[in-house]
Image: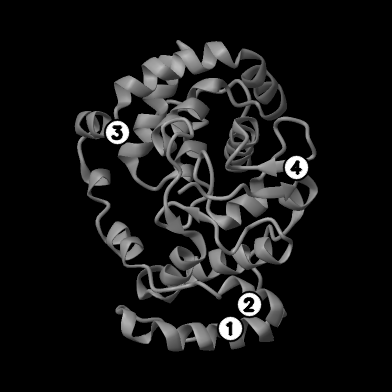
Amino acid sequence: MRMKKLFLAAAAAMGVLHAVPAFAQGPQCGNTSAGFEAWVADFKQTAAANGVSQAVLSRAFANVNYNKPTIAADRGQKSFKLSFDAFMQKRGGAAVISRGRSMEAANQALFASIERRFGVPAGPLIAIWGMETGFGSYMGNQHTLSAVSTLAYDCRRSDYFTDQLYAALQLVSEGYLSPQAKGAAHGEIGQTQFLPRNVVRFGADGDGDGRVDMVGSRADALASTANFLKGHGWRAGAGYQPGEPNFVAIQGWNAASVYQQAIAYIGQQIDGK
C-alpha cells in the first residue's frame, strides 16, 4: 500500500526547525516491546509539556504500535558491510546506471533547472533516487509514525529518533503528514526517502506548484535531495568523487562508506565525468 501524498508548503519546509529544540527530559528507552505502551504514554505527557497539542498527539498516536519490522531492519543492515562490488550487485547498481541514463535523458529540463538552482548535477541525484526507491517504484509499506516512535523508544538511537518524532509531529500538526502515512522501515518518506526532520529542513518545491510532495512529485523529491546536498556543503562545479570537495556532502546522505562510494560511482557513470 502506497503512502498517502505528503504536501508541505515550501516556506515551512525551507525555514522551520533548523535547530534541534531544547526539549524537556523524555521517558526512559527500552529494548523490547514490553515497555512501549508505557513509553508512549510518558512521551505524550512530555510532548504536551513541550507545547504539542493534545489534539495532535491523539491523532498522531491513534494507530501507533511497536513495529517489529522496523527493529529487524535497524538491526540487520548487513548490506552496508559488504565490499563495493558486492554492494553494487545487491543494490542493482548496473541497472540503476542504465535506467538512470534514460531518466536523465527524459528529464533534461528538470535536472538542468535543479542544477541551476542548487548546483547539484543529475548523476548523484539519480544514483540516490534509483538506489533508495527504484526511481519511486517502491517507497515502503511501514506505518511511518509507528516506525519513528519505535526507534525513539529503542535505546540504540533514542535521542536521534526522538528528534525525528518531534519533527513528524510538527508535520502532522500542520496537516502535511497523515497519521496513516506509510513509508520505509525507519520512517523515511517519499521517492528519495527523507526522514521527517529532513523534510522540514530541506523540502523544496521543484515543480513550481507552491507545495512539496515528496511522494507524488519526482521534481519535488529531486529538488529536495539537491537542497539536502547543498545544505551539507555541496559546491557548484566541484567534483564529488572520494577526496574531492563535494564528497563530504554525499557523506552527509548516508554514514556507510560503501553507500557513499556507490553514489559517487553511479553518479559519475551517469554524468559521464
Lower position in the chain sequence, tag 4 or tag 1: 1
Res. 111 visible in picture:
yes
State the mark number for residue 44: 1
Lower position in the chain sequence, tag 3 or tag 2: 2
Assess whether mark 2 and mark 1 are in contact (beta carbons under 8 angstroms): yes
Lower position in the chain sequence, tag 4 or tag 2: 2
Left or right of 240: which side holds 89?
left
Badge 2 marks a residue whose secondary structure is helix
Q: Judge by depth and name the residue closer to the eye, 178 or 93.
A: 178
Assess whether mark 2 and mark 3 are in contact (beta carbons under 8 angstroms): no
Amino acid beneath label 2: Leu
Disc 4 to disc 1, C-alpha distance: 30 Å
Q: Position of residue 196 (x, y in %)?
A: 57, 56
Disc 4 to disc 2, C-alpha distance: 25 Å
Amino acid beneath label 1: Lys
Amino acid beneath label 4: Arg
Q: Residues within 10 Å of mark 4 (few under 14, many from 20)?
A: many
Q: Residues within 10 Å of mark 1 (few under 14, many from 20)?
A: some
State the mark number for residue 57: 2
State the mark number for residue 211: 4
